[in-house]
Amino acid sequence: MDIEPPQPGQAREIIPGLRWMRFPLPFPPHDVNVWLLEDGEGWLAIDAGMGNEETRTNWRLALAGEAFGNRPLTGLLVTHFHPDHAGLMGWLSAEHRLAPMMTRIEWLQARSLWFDTGAEMIDHQVEFARIAGAPAEYGAFMRARGPLYQRSVAPLPRAYRAIADGDTVVIGGRAWRVMTGQGHAPDMACLFCAEARVLIAADQILPRITPYIGLHAGEPMADPLGGFLATLDRFRVLPEDTLVLPSHGVPFTPLHRRLDALAAHHADRLAVLEEACRTPATAHALLPTLFRRPLDHRSLGFGLGETLAHLRRLEAMGRVERLPDADGVIAWGRI
Ligand SMILES: [Zn+2]
């Protein structure tokens, strides 16, 4: 689809009754999309953007300007708990007297993380990185940095409205089916409208980058990459000419080619990693097999999470095993 991205505070029409807004982010991928769906007297927004002053300013501009066209914000649906999507959920909900829609797992994840700011939380994350082979100075960096979530997420609402996979949400007379996705977040909401052939894909299917798939300290035996790949398969039932509206990047078609490319990318990464495990190594020592450039401390957590997600997938497939040393540091070896 050949359409210029909107400037911050402005909106562009994608199809009648559906508008695209884009907000800058202070980190890659550098911006996040918000979709406005006409709904009766007002607009329902899909996602709230990052919890910072710049995003608040852009929301105010949009609400007062042509983007909203003198009509109010009357609904909010938040796709997942990450700060660039849920950051201003509480602010928008309070200002516009809304109860946001969210899947129950994403809601509970946001609520629990927001309050999890104690030193024990960091201790647990430092230990997770240590047994993955990270150097001691990375632990010191994490302690100095402290918990991150609350910093970029405004105080959350106390009530919400749960949506779940398979639900139909009627917005502006159009039926949107909720399809949840796993891997990037635990139960991310995507929305498909058969009538318009539009998929609001959140971070599940992005056009240029692969969504971050990471293993987290809170659920070290999860298999997020397995969940992500299974979700790609579930989205294959959608029509090939579906217009995909991703949370980062520009609207695109065709859908199936992108599903194939994402699956192929991870199949390739898994093969490379399995080969590297012929010589048992920690997740930290395996970073160069997945990342061309060395990672600084700010990127190391993502790098370890992504590497561990691939190792967990290989472990679940029976291809590698974990070989802990006397200090509990885990090397991964090919079976
Ligand atoms: Zn995102």
Image (tube, rainbow, N blue to C red):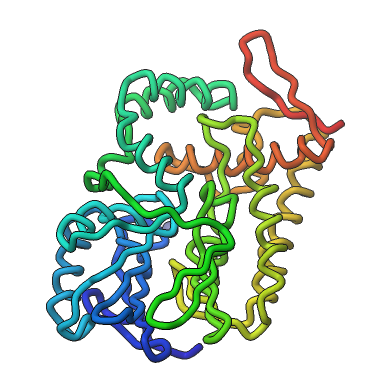
Residue under the image location 35 percent in, 88 percent down:
13
Asked where in the image residue 317 lies, by quadrant, the reply is top right
Q: Nearer the viewer, residue 83 or 141?
A: 83
Asked whether residue 256 appears in the rendered view, the answer is yes
Q: Quadrant of the C terminus?
A: top right
Residue 177 image point, x, y percent = 54, 70
Residue 216 image point, x, y percent = 53, 35
Residue under the image location 83 percent in, 37 percent down:
319
Residue 108 image point, x, y percent = 41, 41
Residue under the image location 35 percent in, 70 percent down:
34
Is 233 on the left-hand or right-hand side of 196?
right
Residue 251 image point, x, y percent = 48, 79
Asked whether residue 210 appears in the rendered view, the answer is no
Is 56 on the left-hand or right-hand side of 84?
left
Extreme residue in the top direction:
326
Which quadrant of the render holds ligand 1? bottom left
Is 234 on the left-hand or right-hand side of 12?
right
| Total numbered labels placed on residues in the image | 0
Q: Nearer the viewer, residue 275 or 154?
A: 154
Q: Nearer the viewer, residue 45 or 289?
A: 45
Is 18 on the left-hand or right-hand side of 207?
left
Extreme residue in the right direction:
335
Asked where in the image residue 240 lies, by quadrant, the reply is bottom right
Q: Nearer the viewer, residue 10 or 286?
A: 10
For residue 302, above or below residue 328: below
Residue under the image location 84 percent in, 36 percent down:
318
